[in-house]
Image: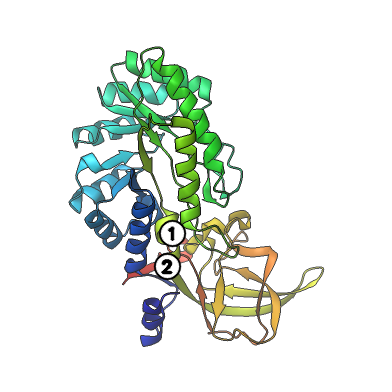
Amino acid sequence: MSEKIANFLAEKRRDTPFLVLDLDLVVDRYRCLKETLPNVDIYYAIKANPADEVVRALADEGSCFDIASLPEMDACLRLGVGASRLSFGHTIKKERDIARAHSSGLDLFAFDSAGELEKLACAAPESRVFCRLTTKGEGADWPLSKKFGCEVDIAEGLLKRAQQLGLKPHGISFHVGSQQTDPEQWDVAIAEAAELFRVLEKVGVKLELINLGGGLPARYLSEVPTVARYCDAINASMHKYFGNQMPAMILEPGRGLVGDAGVIQAEVVLVADRHNGSASRWVYLDIGKFGGLPETIGEAIKYRIRTSRDGGETVPSILAGPTCEELDVLYERTPYPLPKDLQVGDRIEIQSAGAYTWSYSAVCFNGIPPLKQYVI
């Protein structure tokens, strides 16, 4: 937790739950990435945290933006970000949405199927397109290996078809999985992309872009390698497989930019001893899966949690949310060691919660309003 956030939490007792985001930390992380990867264009994955303040600050730093919908595009345009700095990186789009994006000046689109390619040819003629490859998602706490991407041989045919349809086959993209804990996972994907570049060039399809996707992690319960370690691994693989024929490069960090910049403050609503076959202590918070913590599904993302009573005796505790939904349990398989004297009304801080929390929050489940956010 930054000193800035600590001071914000200390100055006033606000209604919980809420997320507080330190904008200086976001900008610092962006500058660190640009310094370490000077030849890579950063396209912030706006879905991670689309707050106007975040978009504006990153735009001022020169960032481009990866969008997944028209509302995200409209937000960028409203804040003065030119369409030339946007990439429509979602591979599943309505044809009318493609058409409006194209008419707004956007001309860089992702695809991973023949059907999407046909829509792009009709709604965004002559636009630049890049094909998303599938990855195994090994090493990622939040894999993205089933719903998106295609195999290399299919991508080869699709990129040839793109040229026949009058589109500009511009490049290759992939995503090694969100919260990727292994920097070497980029190596296999870059190798496949490089081979595809060579194969297609032989048949007259000249690719110019490799989109390295996202995956840079935040610091949750387990330690992760440094940002520099990831950047070094990416640089090494690019030079190994492309040599002096380096294409243009894009990186799409979301969690890696804003995750560690945010803290959620929540309140203990109930502490209860349950005896469902075995004695266990349940701690219920005023935030759960539906209030901004859906990435606890399957206990995939394990947040660091602090309380004002840390330092004393602890008890393994099952953490749950406040709603009447049975699925609203955060951590049960791996109970958290929380203070034995934790009480109703105590405040707790969920660390590194700046990404995929506020933007994931349900609108009104059980009548509970969406998670509040303060950007400072």
Q: Is residue 147 left or right of residue 81?
A: right
Q: How many marks?
A: 2
Q: Residue flagged by tag 1: what amino acid is it?
A: Ala
Look at the numbered discs 1 and 2 and tell me whether their residues touch, using CB distance below 8 Å. Answer: yes
User: Could you say whether the residue bearing mark 1 is in a helix, strand or loop?
Assistant: loop
**What residue sits 32% from the left and 62% below the top?**
27
Image location (x, y in percent) of residue 273: 72, 78
Question: Looking at the rendering, in which quadrant would you find the N terminus?
Answer: bottom left
Q: Is residue 360 visible?
A: yes
Q: Indicate the quadrant containing the C terminus: top left, top right, bottom left or bottom right.
A: bottom left
Residue 333 vs 194, above or below: the answer is: below
Q: Is residue 207 left or right of residue 317?
A: left
Considering the numbered disc 2 on the image, is that residue within a helix, a strand or a loop? strand
Which residue is identified by label 2? 262
Residue at left offset 43%, top offset 31%: 243
Dot 1 or dot 2, earlier in sequence: 2
Q: Which label was assigned to residue 87? A: none
User: For mark 1, what is the residue?
Assistant: 355
| Percent of width and height locating residue 164 | 33, 13
| Residue 307 falls in image quadrant | bottom right
